[in-house]
Image: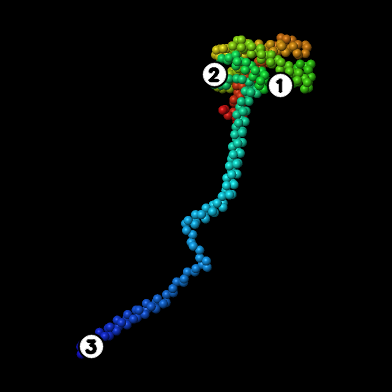
């Protein structure tokens, strides 16, 4: 009786276990059927292979090459513009450098720049300076043109015409007088061994330089290039040139009066010329030219 009851209880327990397993299996299958499966990915009609890193680089380079023509044109335009600007600047600087030296060849003549030592001149150097100061450079002719214009404005000599014919006579008169005066001055300076060139002052300041320029019109160095002497050759030549000019000037004429007038002109115009030479470098710097 007891055994039968135990056997019947065991049988019921086994049935319950089997039933639980069956229910668990059925529930899992139901859940699996209830969960929707993910839809399949859409495939393109003509599938293309994905570009690799090697394919991307040429595509980028092709894109860059497509934009290069405009960029290259802009760079070429920039280079041409910069080149033209540089060429213009170089031409301007060259013109200013030439302008810096214009007083040497066109008006002032030969002089010794500041800082350069004075060296006694040879006979050949004296001949070259004489030709430059008298015949072979434009400066002397410009001086004679200026002097002839001054005579034309004053109307001297009064016997000559006021038009172009009179100006031609006055210019020719100044030309002959200047050549005679320069020739006599060159001979006198060579005989005395005097310095015929103007030397820029080694001093500083406006008034010391002005005083130096005016005094150099009346005194110059002897052969030592250190000792100052009166400008006997310069003023003797000016006086002699004025006297010689009376040979072609109309009457009435006074030889000594013409000589004295020429010497006085040398005192005035010579001082102005020395002042111009003394401050020529400063003038050119104000104009924008640079020393080489």
Left or right: residue 197 compared with residue 5? right
Front residue of 31/190: it is 190
Q: Is residue 19 visible?
A: yes
Q: Position of residue 2 (x, y in %)?
A: 20, 88
- Location of residue 227 (image quadrant): top right
Residue at 66%, 18% in the rendered image: 134
Residue at 59%, 40% in the rendered image: 82
Residue at 29%, 84% in the rendered image: 15
- For the residue labelled by badge 3, is the local secondary structure a helix, a strand or a loop? helix
Point out which mark residue 7 bears. none
- For the residue labelled by badge 2, is the local secondary structure a helix, a strand or a loop? loop
**Cβ–Cβ below 8 Å for labels 1 and 2?**
no
Mark 1 is surrounded, within 10 Å at the Cα level, by few (under 14), some (14 to 19) or many (20 or more) other residues, namely some
Q: Which residue is mark 2?
A: 117
Q: Position of residue 69 (x, y in %)?
A: 58, 49
Q: Position of residue 164 (x, y in %)?
A: 77, 22
Precedes in sequence: disc 3 or disc 1: 3
Q: Where the N terminus falls, by quadrant?
A: bottom left
Q: Position of residue 59 (x, y in %)?
A: 52, 55
Q: Which residue is mark 1?
A: 145
Precedes in sequence: disc 3 or disc 2: 3
Point out which mark residue 5 bears. 3
């Amino acid at each position: 009786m007891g055994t039968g009851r135990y056997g019947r209880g065991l049988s019921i327990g086994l049935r319950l276990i089997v039933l639980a397993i069956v229910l668990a299996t059925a529930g899992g299958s139901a859940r699996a059927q209830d969960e929707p499966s993910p839809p399949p990915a859409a495939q393109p009609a003509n599938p293309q292979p994905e570009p690799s890193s090697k394919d991307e680089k040429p595509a980028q380079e092709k894109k860059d090459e497509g934009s290069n023509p405009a960029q290259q044109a802009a760079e070429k335009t920039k280079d041409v513009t910069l080149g033209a600007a540089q060429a213009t600047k170089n031409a301007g600087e060259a013109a200013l450098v030439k302008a810096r030296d214009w007083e040497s060849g066109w008006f002032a003549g030969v002089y010794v720049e500041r800082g350069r030592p004075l060296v006694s001149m040879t006979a050949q150097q004296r001949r070259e300076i004489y030709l430059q100061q008298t015949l072979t450079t434009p400066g002397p002719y410009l001086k004679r043109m200026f002097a002839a214009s001054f005579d034309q404005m004053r109307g001297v000599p009064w016997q000559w015409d006021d038009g172009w014919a009179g100006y031609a006579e006055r210019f020719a008169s100044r030309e002959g007088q200047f050549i005679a005066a320069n020739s006599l001055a060159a001979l006198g300076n060579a005989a005395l061994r005097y310095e015929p060139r103007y030397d820029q002052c080694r001093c500083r300041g406006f008034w010391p330089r002005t005083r130096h320029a005016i005094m150099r019109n009346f005194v110059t160095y002897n052969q030592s290039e250190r000792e100052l002497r009166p400008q006997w050759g310069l003023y003797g030549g000016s006086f002699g040139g004025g006297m010689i000019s009376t040979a072609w000037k109309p009457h009435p004429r006074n030889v000594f009066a013409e000589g004295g007038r020429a010497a006085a002109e040398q005192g005035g115009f010579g001082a102005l010329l020395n002042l111009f030479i003394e401050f020529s470098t400063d003038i050119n710097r104000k104009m924008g030219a640079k020393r080489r």
